[in-house]
Amino acid sequence: MIIIGIETSCDETAVAVLEGTGDLSPSGLNLRSNIIASQVKLHRQFGGVVPEVASRKHVETIIPVIEKALDKAGVTLPDITAVSATYGPGLVGAVLVGLSAAKALAVALNIPFIGVNHIEAHMYANFLEHPHLRPPFVCLVVSGGHSDLIYLRDYGDYEVLGRTRDDAAGEAFDKVARALGLDYPGGPAIDEVSKGGNPSAVRFPRAFLEAGSYDFSFSGLKTSVVNYLAKAQSGGEEISVPDIAASFQEAVVDVLVDKTLKAASKKHTPIVALAGGVAANSRLRQELYLRAQERGVDVKYPSPILCTDNAAMVTCVGYFQLLLKGSSPLDLPASPSLSLE
Ligand code: KG4
Ligand code: ZN
């Protein structure tokens, strides 16, 4: 089976080609190409993603990126068995570009179309690089739009244990980075600058919420950093960007790791996985690994390039979904607030 996948839910125009044996097992998967045309430079001047600008750029880029992905995979259109695309959640105008391209390919080639949930796709990036990984496990999906703790009981069978009550983790990284005068996107900038900072310099608040809750809240932490900066500025105090960045990052990581490991213990699973753009964070990866090891829990995460938005993850869900549930209807609408349950 050769699946082509398309991802345009935010600011990356991405197309990938995946080859599979037709078995319900990640071990037979072979990612043949994974092309990502990033719009980061375009949106940097605005300090964040501008939806209309993103959609227009997807329209310009989608066909060349499809051609490049086919070329790199060494296949042509008649070789394709099925086409998958993200249909939500995401920016509706952006999602529509990739979704329409995928439906057009399905009709023109007379092959199945599979609509993919972007959050599910982030989780499935783990199967591409850990061929022996099997459900059940707990997965922390942390991106620009989501912070969800999910129990992946089986392929296609999920229980959302917790989610953010306000800002997503990536959103908090981006907003704090902006307050610190760092470049967009803020996550990678904070990750980098924190390497030269002291994570214990400032004890920012950790929102653990009520006992037993797996929900997250990052807006109080973000406000606390902003207030700290304003106070230092008005007092003429010199601030250390690396120290503040590292202290903020530590507060986020502390809560994420704590709740992920508690969820693993509640579900009696010895495996936890990370997914989404924030899963590329070096401190989160390191801290989760260390604290999980103390409890005998195994940690999986994808390479950074498969944590941030990509289409490889969309081909992976497309593959499993086609085998398990069959194709999606061609009138499947874009669903900007699609959830997992
Ligand atoms: O998954 P993603 O590419 O797009 C969404 O689905 O939202 O995630 C993007 C988010 C941004 O907020 C970005 O700042 C954050 O992931 N991010 C990071 C890192 N790399 C990307 N956050 C922390 N550390 C990183 N290294
Ligand atoms: Zn994403």
Image (cartoon, rainbow, N blue to C red):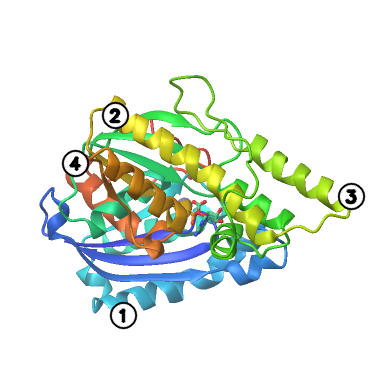
| The C terminus lies in quadrant | top left
Labels 1 & 4 near each other (Cβ < 8 A): no
Front-most of residues 82 and 179: 179
- Give the residue drawn at x 77%, y 49%: 229
| Residue at which label 1 appears | 71
Few, some or many C-alpha atoms within 10 Å of disc 2 (few <14, some 14-19, many ≥20)? Answer: some
SS of the residue at dot 2? Answer: helix
* In front: label 3 or label 2: 3
Spatial CA distance of label 2 from label 4 is 29 Å
- Residue 317 in the image: x percent, y percent? 29, 50
* In front: label 2 or label 4: 2
| Residue at which label 3 appears | 234
Task: Confirm if mark 2 falls within 8 A of ligand 1.
Answer: no
Placement of 78 over or under 98, stated as above or below: below
Q: Residue 324: which numbered mark, if any?
A: 4
- Note whether residue 100 is visible: no
* In front: label 2 or label 1: 2
Placement of 306 over or under 254, stated as above or below: below
Q: Report the number of numbered marks.
A: 4
- Residue 318 in the image: x percent, y percent? 28, 51
- Give the residue drawn at x 54%, y 60%: 191
SS of the residue at dot 4? Answer: helix
SS of the residue at dot 1? Answer: helix
Spatial CA distance of label 1 from label 3 is 57 Å
Few, some or many C-alpha atoms within 10 Å of disc 1 (few <14, some 14-19, many ≥20)? Answer: some
Sequence-wise, the earlier of marks 1 and 3 is 1
Query: Which amino acid, by three-letter code, is at mark 1?
Result: Asp
Placement of 265 over or under 323, stated as above or below: above
Residue 17 vs residue 190: left or right?
Answer: left
| Residue at which label 2 appears | 265
